[in-house]
Each structure stands twice: as structure tokens, then as C-alpha cells.
Amino acid sequence: MSRKTLSKIEACLRRVNNAEVMMLAKILGCKITDLFPAHTKAVLLVLRHSK
């Protein structure tokens, strides 16, 4: 995955496909479910802190 691709994902300009989700989980050493917040409020909290 290129830096440009990762940048677009972080900026919510590009969706992540299934293979990329699996790759990111493996690289980060976490479960796939850890990449998805359980609640919408958690998503908003992450987005606020990432800016």
C-alpha cells in the first residue's frame, strides 16, 4: 500500500476493501473487529481526535 493510498484512506477519500482490511489488521497486530468501532459515537470521537 502506497503512502498516497494510506493518506486517502485516512482522509476518508477512499474506501478500504476486504483484502486491505485484513492486511492492515495483520500489520497492526490486531483483530479485524478492532478496526471497526462498536458504536457510531466512537467513530465521531475518533474523527474529532484525528483532525
Image (cartoon, rainbow, N blue to C red):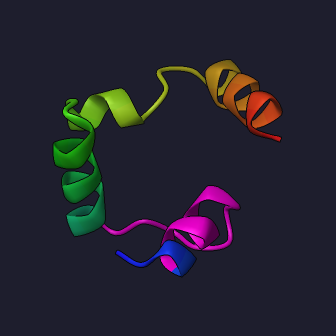
Side (left or right) of 16 relative to 26: right
The N terminus lies in quadrant: bottom left
Direction front: furthest residue:
3
Side (left or right) of 34 relative to 50: left
What residue is shown at x 49% (from left), y 27% (from top)?
Answer: 37
What residue is shown at x 82% (from left), y 31% (from top)?
Answer: 48
Q: Is residue 22 above or below residue 13?
A: above
What residue is shown at x 70% (from left), y 61% (from top)?
Answer: 11
Q: Is residue 32 above or below residue 39?
A: below
Residue 20 % position (x, y): 28, 64
The residues colored magenta run 5-17
Q: Quadrant of residue 25?
A: top left
Residue 21 % position (x, y): 29, 55
Residue 51 % position (x, y): 83, 41
Q: Quadrant of residue 18?
A: bottom left
Q: Is residue 40 above or below residue 7?
A: above
Q: Is residue 27 above or below residue 17?
A: above
Tally of numbered tags: 0
Choose between 45 and 39: the one closer to the eye.
45
What residue is shown at x 19% (from left), y 33% (from top)?
Answer: 29
Q: Is residue 13 magenta?
A: yes
